[in-house]
């Protein structure tokens, strides 16, 4: 049983890292365009920050809606809360 839980935790962590890498890649591709300098300029940094913020807010909103949906389904099926 403990091995199963550890496998689930490892898979959850892998899924998180995969998602994190996708967001980082998407925000980088969308925001960083100037490669003639060693530093990230202010415009690129602000864009990347906004991109990540938007993703996090979207994820939070989807999670809230999913929880609401689950609660409504539970109520409709007569399950106690």
Image (cartoon, rainbow, N blue to C red):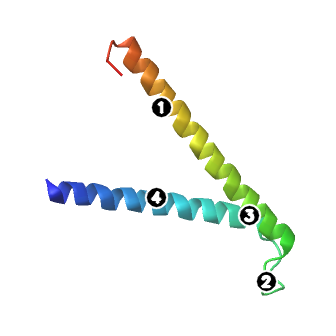
Where does the C terminus fall, quadrant-wise? top left
Which marked residue is nearer to the observer: mark 1 or mark 4? 1
In x, y percent, where is residue 23?
Answer: 61, 59
Instruction: First in sequence, mark 3 or 4: give its number.
Output: 4
Residue 38 lies left or right of residue 9; in this view the side is right
In x, y percent, where is residue 71?
Answer: 43, 23
Q: Residues within 10 Å of mark 4 (few under 14, many from 20)?
A: few
Whole-angstrom CA distance, mark 4 to mark 2, is 28 Å
Residue occupied by mark 1: 67
- Judged from the image, the secondary structure of the residue bearing numbered disc 4 is helix
Instruction: Identify which residue is drawn at 45% across, 19% down.
Output: 72
Q: Quadrant of residue 53?
A: bottom right
Whole-angstrom CA distance, mark 1 to mark 2, is 41 Å
Which labelled disc corresponds to residue 16? 4
Q: Residues within 10 Å of mark 2 (few under 14, many from 20)?
A: few
Residue occupied by mark 2: 39
- Judged from the image, the secondary structure of the residue bearing numbered disc 3 is helix
Whole-angstrom CA distance, mark 3 to mark 2, is 14 Å
In x, y percent, where is residue 77?
Answer: 34, 13
Whole-angstrom CA distance, mark 1 to mark 4, is 19 Å
Q: Given contact means CB atoms under 8 Å apart, are the residues at marks 1 and 4 in contact?
A: no
Whole-angstrom CA distance, mark 3 to mark 1, is 29 Å
- Please tell me whether residue 4 is drawn above or below residue 41 in the rendered image: above
Residue 7 lies left or right of residue 53; in this view the side is left
- Judged from the image, the secondary structure of the residue bearing numbered disc 1 is helix
Instruction: First in sequence, mark 1 or 4: give its number.
Output: 4
């Amino acid at each position: 049983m403990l091995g199963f839980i550890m496998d689930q935790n490892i898979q959850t962590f892998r899924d998180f890292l995969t998602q994190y890498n996708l967001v980082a890649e998407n925000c980088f591709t969308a925001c960083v365009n100037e490669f003639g300098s060693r530093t990230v300029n202010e415009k690129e940094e602000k864009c990347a920050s906004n991109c990540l913020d938007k993703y996090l807010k979207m994820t939070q909103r989807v999670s809230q809606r999913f929880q609401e949906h689950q609660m409504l389904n539970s109520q409709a099926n007569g399950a106690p809360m």
